[in-house]
């Protein structure tokens, strides 16, 4: 099982985090945590870095500059709504991609794109 711990950014549902958690992965969602739901991107990134979590986000513009700005360093898993449209009716493609990515259990760099 992967040692990666994820924090799903605000655009992702707590249900997605729960489905990954049910599969044995350590995943939390910003939208499911009242202390993070109203937080700024900087605060979310800082919390994730301190908690040893990689942030899954579509927000490349705001998060990538934070990778080298924070201590401990921030790690990102980037994705696109074009590649994986967010859908509560059909979360299967994104869920499968994340399950495969987390299950691979390989060392990764600070910025990764979800294949």
Image: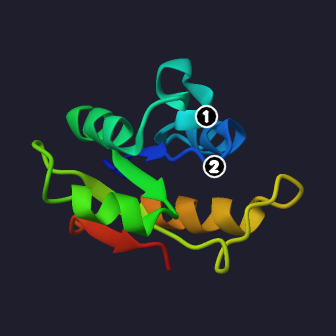
Residue drawn at 24 percent across, 55 percent down: 66
x and y, in percent, of residue 90 in the image: 84, 61
Q: Which residue matches tag 1?
A: 31
Q: Quadrant of the rendered structure where residue 98 is?
A: bottom right
Q: Secondary structure at mark 2?
A: loop
Residue 42 vertical placement versus 81 (above, below)? above
Is 11 on the left or on the right of 15, as rendered? left
How crowded pointer 1 is (Cα within 10 Å; few <14, some 14-19, many 20+) is rated as many
x and y, in percent, of residue 41 in the image: 40, 44
| Number of numbered tags placed on the structure image | 2
Residue drawn at 52 percent across, 40 percent down: 24
Residue drawn at 30 percent across, 32 percent down: 47
Q: Which mark is residue 66?
A: none
Q: Which residue matches tag 2?
A: 12
x and y, in percent, of residue 45 in the image: 32, 43
Q: Secondary structure at mark 1?
A: helix
Residue drawn at 33 percent across, 35 percent down: 43
Residue 48 vertical placement versus 103 (above, below)? above
Please, which residue is most extreme toward the top here?
A: 35
Is 34 on the left or on the right of 91, as rendered? left
Q: Are marks 2 and 1 in contact (CB under 8 Å)?
A: yes
The colour mode here is rainbow
Q: Is residue 1 visible?
A: no
Residue 42 vertical placement versus 47 (above, below)? below
Q: Depth check: 74 or 109 in front?
A: 74
Q: Is residue 35 visible?
A: yes
Q: Quadrant of the rendered structure where residue 75 is?
A: bottom left
How crowded pointer 2 is (Cα within 10 Å; few <14, some 14-19, many 20+) is rated as many
x and y, in percent, of residue 57 in the image: 49, 58
Q: Depth check: 54 or 34 in front?
A: 34
Is 95 on the left or on the right of 112, as rendered? right
């Amino acid at each position: 099982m992967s040692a990666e711990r994820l924090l799903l950014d605000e655009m992702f549902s707590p249900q997605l985090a729960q489905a990954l958690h049910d599969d044995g992965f350590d995943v939390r969602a910003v939208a499911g945590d009242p202390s993070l739901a109203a937080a700024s991107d900087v605060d979310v990134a800082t919390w994730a870095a301190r908690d040893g979590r990689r942030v899954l986000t579509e927000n490349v513009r705001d998060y990538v500059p934070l990778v080298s700005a924070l201590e401990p360093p921030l790690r990102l898993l980037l994705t696109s709504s074009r590649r994986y449209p967010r859908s509560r009716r059909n979360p299967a493609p994104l869920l499968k991609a994340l399950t495969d990515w987390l299950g691979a259990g390989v060392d990764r760099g600070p910025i990764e794109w979800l294949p």
